[in-house]
Image: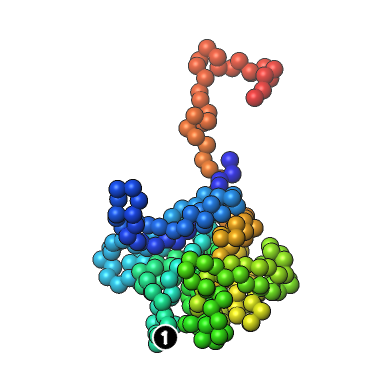
Amino acid sequence: MRKTPLIGVTTYLEQARWGAWDVRAAVVQSAYLEMVEAGGGQPVLLPPPTSSPHGATSEDAVAAVRAGPFLDSLDGLVLAGGADVAPARYRAEADPALGTVRTDRDAAELALLAAALDRDMPVLAICRGVQVLNVACGGDLIQHLPDRLGHDGHQPGGGRFGKVRVAIDEGSSLAGILGTAADVSCSHHQAIARLGTGLVVVARSTEGVVEAVEMPGRRFVVGVQWHPEQDREVRLFSALVDAAGALAKPEPLPASAERIEEPDHLAGRASGGAETC
């Protein structure tokens, strides 16, 4: 039986409220999970580490210990959107306009990504995720895009998304999925500056902002600066799940499907070849 690909989706650890509860929880917008399911996969939540295993002390060490076991049973990875990547990760001073950073999530996602790339596991990196991908490959970021563009059209704020027209390079994997142009939903005040090693730019906005990258030679590594889950753009998630399907191992037969020995009085019933099953 073909196994449904298991797709890890990164999450936050946040104080969250629902019903009578006000507790720390692993959270992510359900749109990511819905799109993974619509694309044919089974989403699996991946929170940052909550404890320090095997005596590891730094966030990076803890994350590295966790990353392998997290991915051992998975077939693909979604790096979800979120807070700014800490500038120290790309050896830069913090801009005054830098937003919230989450060093626990930086450590966890950089470790997960390294382990995924080592396995040639399919990866879809979304918004913050494409920035993590670029930093992991040695690139850096524009810390506050409105200073470059003179407007906040890529991140209007107030929980709203900006609509951005992107041109996608003909012949790229992304063009094969979406075509050579798309109107997309954006919520980012940062963007790729110096491109990381091994990545190629495959889409830009009309102002020239890098909006998507790929890693040629890999099974599937695509990063988009926009939010396909908000647009209900299932084609990107379907492409990820299809690539992950090649890694998914067949599900074992349930115990009830294993061969059952026949009682002695029935043994040899088909010995004459008259019955087959």
Amino acid carrying mark 1 in the image:
Asp
Q: Where 74 falls versus 138 (above or below)?
A: above
In terms of secondary structure, where does tag 1 sit? Answer: loop
Q: Position of residue 73 (x, y in %)?
A: 46, 53
Q: Quadrant of the C terminus?
A: top right
Give the residue displayed 28% in from the left and 64% down from the top. 52
- The quarter of the picture where residue 87 lies is bottom left
* 76 to the left or right of 277: left
In front here: 31 or 259?
31
Q: Position of residue 142 (x, y in %)?
A: 50, 83
Q: Quadrant of the N terminus?
A: top right
* 155 to the left or right of 100: right
Give the residue displayed 55% in from the left and 81% down from the top. 151
Give the residue displayed 71% in from the left and 70% down from the top. 181
In front here: 124 or 191?
191
Q: Can you identify the residue that label 1 sits on?
A: 95
In front here: 207 or 25?
207
- The quarter of the picture where residue 112 lies is bottom left
* 41 to the left or right of 71: right
Q: Position of residue 6 (x, y in %)?
A: 51, 52
Q: Where 264 falls versus 43 (above or below)?
A: above
